[in-house]
Image (cartoon, rainbow, N blue to C red):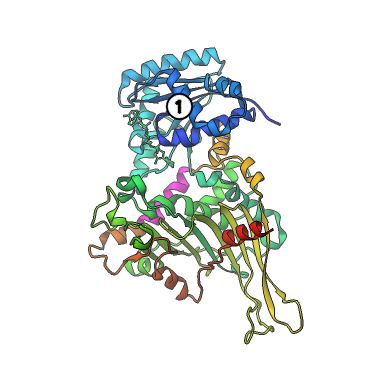
């Protein structure tokens, strides 16, 4: 059943990229589905001097691909108001308050407010402070603050930011976005684990050999060179998205799927990750690299990108081995890798099970041998699961064939499935914190990442620890060596490609 929600959204950074590409389309989808209808309004703020009319045109442009009924889209855009506002200027909050109160009355919004900070993190603290100081936080309705990533650049800065936010908002009013937590298949991890006896009963170190998580991108840093060069893949991808996925894979079954129950298990999971403290431990378990370009494909090396220091040691690729020191996972490596300018844009998780204790099937003079079972969770662009099994090849003899059983959502289902931002905005409207990062999760993730960063940052000469990889490859050979030293290898089966080919041939 669809319940109509009531709220005033104030979007800081309304003229920016995120608002245009993600927020307005997501709000429109919620509108089309009836989750917001009559009792909502949106105030867009930024420094640019836009009129309401111009803002509405921008909003209509951002949703043009979703419009089926022009009149409906225009009615939606009529709920949008714009006010030029410099977030550092107290006077501007006074005007914002007047507009907020008038819209509250006009649309009967019951004092419910969602403040979305789609801006550079340097402004998060000041906005939260001014919202309280200038009394934009209401007494009667709910007040929720949505914060974009990155949340700090290490534990210390994240803690300082959190302390500032907490002067104006309680923890249960702060919704820290990690858009991976809004993805269908990330949310599905718990469904696969906790509703299937065949997986639930095997989800431990007795039956799982290793876990491999890949978040690969084909693009380079593009116009974000300055931001990226100051952060790198460890901060940009591992601290948040990858550790959140690890927590969901590692956590114990929660008492329920309610926010508090899931969060407390995730926090325990993150606390059980082994911290690597010495340079030897870090170098043995984590490697970093930069893309070196690919002249054949006219791809530039990272250090040649605009706004990147030509002597930069910032990593565009990270691979690592994460160990979980608890009863369930002791001894099972979780290998992770992420990078820019890699061979494919894909996110997937391989759960590799232990092999049978004795292989009685042929291993020589045959094309395929029995391989360990692998459960793959395809997060994007494919969404679904596949399971690698062994079967006998048709015909005489006992030659084996590796087969894949799969459940991949078809294009129509994927197209109709809510976007990550749409889900998260609705969760926030409903006051459901499950798919947002709690401060304790953020803090623990920074503790893990900071130890690695500390060792890397102390290496003045990183010729031996910062590797290069050819652009549009799956990373440097040192990433392969990380698994080979444990007797494993990355499972490179390109399922998306073969699935696409199979579909095209049918
Ligand atoms: P952006 O395109 O650079 O937008 C920044 C916004 O901030 C603009 O609307 C800008 O508008 C406004 N602004 C800057 N200084 C201001 C000031 N003093 N007072 C008021 N407004 C000011 O950035 P973005 O890509 O949308 O990213 C926003 C946030 O989302 C960042 O934290 C980013 O890391 C995060 N994020 C973005 C994406 C994405 O896909 N874009 C994805 C994940 C996370 P004016 O110039 O008109 O003031």
Q: Look at the image and say whether residue 186 sits in the magenta stretch.
A: no
The relative height of residue 142 versus residue 149 in the rendered view (above or below) is above
Q: Magenta stretch: dominant SS?
A: helix
Residue at 35% in and 57% down: 298
SS for callout 1? helix
Q: Look at the image and say whether residue 448 sits in the magenta stretch.
A: yes
> Residue 260: in sight, yes or no?
yes
Residue 474 position within the rendered picture, expressed as x and y whole percent measured from the top left = 45, 64
Ligand 1 appears in which quadrant?
top left
The relative height of residue 214 versus residue 417 in the rendered view (above or below) is below
Q: Residue furthest bottom?
A: 365
Q: Viewer-proximal residue, 12 or 248?
A: 12
Mark 1 close to ligand 1, CB under 8 Å: no
Residue corresponding to mark 1? 58
The relative height of residue 350 versus residue 152 in the rendered view (above or below) is below
Q: Viewer-proximal residue, 133 or 316?
A: 316
Report whether 93 appears left or right of 9: left
Residue 48 position within the rendered picture, expressed as x and y whole percent measured from the top left = 34, 25
Residue 237 position within the rendered picture, expressed as x and y whole percent measured from the top left = 43, 52
**Which corner quadrant of the image does residue 125 belong to?**
top left
> Residue 246: in sight, yes or no?
no
Residue at 52% in and 55% down: 347
Q: Viewer-proximal residue, 282 or 492?
A: 492
Residue at 66% in and 60% down: 505
Residue 79 position within the rendered picture, expressed as x and y whole percent measured from the top left = 52, 20
**Which corner quadrant of the image does residue 451 belong to?**
bottom left
- Count the marks: 1
Are there few (<14), some (14-19), or many (20+) residues within 10 Å of tag 1? some
What's the magenta region? 438-451
Q: Where does the N terminus fall, quadrant-wise?
A: top right
Q: Where does the C terminus fall, quadrant-wise?
A: bottom right
């Amino acid at each position: 059943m669809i319940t109509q929600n009531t709220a005033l959204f104030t979007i800081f950074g309304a003229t920016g990229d995120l608002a245009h590409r993600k927020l307005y389309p997501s709000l429109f989808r919620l509108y089309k589905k009836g989750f917001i209808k009559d009792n909502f309004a949106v105030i867009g703020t930024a420094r640019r001097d836009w009129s309401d009319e111009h803002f509405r045109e921008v909003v209509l442009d951002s949703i043009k691909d979703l419009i089926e009924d022009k009149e409906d889209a225009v009615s939606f855009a009529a709920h949008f108001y714009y006010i030029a506002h410099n977030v550092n200027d107290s006077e501007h909050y006074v005007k914002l308050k007047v507009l907020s109160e008038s819209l509250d009355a006009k649309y009967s919004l019951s004092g419910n407010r969602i403040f979305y900070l789609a801006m550079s993190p340097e402004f998060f603290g000041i906005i939260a402070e001014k919202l309280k100081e200038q009394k934009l936080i209401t007494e009667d309705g709910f007040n929720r603050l949505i914060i974009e990533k990155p949340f700090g650049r290490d534990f210390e800065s994240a803690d300082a930011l959190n302390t500032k936010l907490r002067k104006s908002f309680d923890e249960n009013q702060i919704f820290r976005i990690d858009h991976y937590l809004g993805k269908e298949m990330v949310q599905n991890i718990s469904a696969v684990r906790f509703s299937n006896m065949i997986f639930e009963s095997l989800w431990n170190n007795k039956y799982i050999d290793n876990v491999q998580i890949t978040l690969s991108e084909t693009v380079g840093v593009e116009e974000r060179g300055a931001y990226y060069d100051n952060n790198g893949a460890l901060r940009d991808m591992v601290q948040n998205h990858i550790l959140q996925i690890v927590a969901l894979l590692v956590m114990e079954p929660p008492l329920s799927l309610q926010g508090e129950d899931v969060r407390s298990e995730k926090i325990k999971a993150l606390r059980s990750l082994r911290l690597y403290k010495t340079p030897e431990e870090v170098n043995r378990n984590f490697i970093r690299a930069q893309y070196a370009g690919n002249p054949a494909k006219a791809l530039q090396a990272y250090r040649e990108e605009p706004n990147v220091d030509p002597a930069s040691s910032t990593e565009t690729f990270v691979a690592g081995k994460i160990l979980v020191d608890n009863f369930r996972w002791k001894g099972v490596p979780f290998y992770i890798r992420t990078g820019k300018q890699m061979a494919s844009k894909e996110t997937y998780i391989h759960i590799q099970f232990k092999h049978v204790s004795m292989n009685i099937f042929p291993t020589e003079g045959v094309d395929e041998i029995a391989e360990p079972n692998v459960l793959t969770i395809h997060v994007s662009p494919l969404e679904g699961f596949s399971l690698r099994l062994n079967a006998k090849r048709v015909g005489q003899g006992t030659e084996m064939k590796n087969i894949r059983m799969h459940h991949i959502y078809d294009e129509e289902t994927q197209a109709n499935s809510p976007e990550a931002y749409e889900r998260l905005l609705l969760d926030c409207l409903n006051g459901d914190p499950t798919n947002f990062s709690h401060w304790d999760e953020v803090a623990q993730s920074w503790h893990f990442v900071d130890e690695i960063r500390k060792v890397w940052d102390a290496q003045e000469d990183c010729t031996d620890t910062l590797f290069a990889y050819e652009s549009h490859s799956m990373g440097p050979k040192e990433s392969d060596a990380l698994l080979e030293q444990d007797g494993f290898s990355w499972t490179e089966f390109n399922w998306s490609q073969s699935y696409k080919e199979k579909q095209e041939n049918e």
